[in-house]
Amino acid sequence: MHDLFADGRAFRVLCARDEHIRESLDVRLVLSRLTQLYGKLAFIRSHQ
């Protein structure tokens, strides 16, 4: 998903949902932990 801030800058949001248990996942928490372990991510690839 993507949108614009009031000043016109674009941002994207990564939404993840486990279709089996139908719960939203806290992607921000997971990415934060990965960044602590491996450093800043160069990119994120997703399948649509």
Image (cartoon, rainbow, N blue to C red):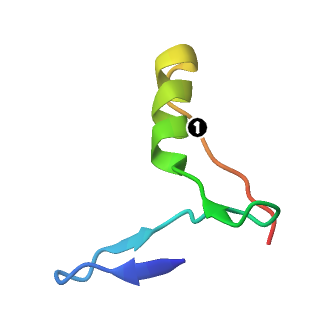
Q: Residue visible at 40% across and 82% down? A: 3
The spot of residue 36 in percent (x, y) is: 46, 19
Q: Describe residue 38's horizontal placement relative to residue 29 as left or right.
A: right
Q: Describe residue 25's horizontal placement relative to residue 4 as left or right.
A: right
Q: Nearer the viewer, residue 28 or 9?
A: 28
The residue at the far front in this view is: 21
The spot of residue 26 in percent (x, y) is: 51, 50
The spot of residue 13 in percent (x, y) is: 48, 66
Q: Describe residue 27's horizontal placement relative to residue 20 as left or right.
A: left
Q: Vertical placement of 47 versus 45: above or below?
A: below
Q: Residue visible at 17% across and 80% down? A: 7
Number of marks: 1
Q: Nearer the viewer, residue 10 or 17?
A: 17
Q: Nearer the viewer, residue 29 or 47?
A: 29
The residue at the far top in this view is: 37
Q: Vertical placement of 8 versus 33: above or below?
A: below
Rate crowding at label 1 as few (under 14), some (14 to 19) or many (20 or more) other CA atoms within 10 Å.
few
Q: Residue visible at 50% across and 26% down? A: 33
Q: Residue visible at 25% across and 78% down? A: 5
Mark 1 element type: loop
Q: Vertical placement of 11 versus 28: above or below?
A: below
Q: Which residue is mark 1?
A: 42
Q: Vertical placement of 42 versus 40: above or below?
A: below
Q: Which quadrant holds the C terminus?
A: bottom right
Q: Which quadrant holds the N terminus?
A: bottom right
Tell me which amino acid carries mark 1: Ala
Q: Describe residue 40's horizontal placement relative to residue 47 as left or right.
A: left
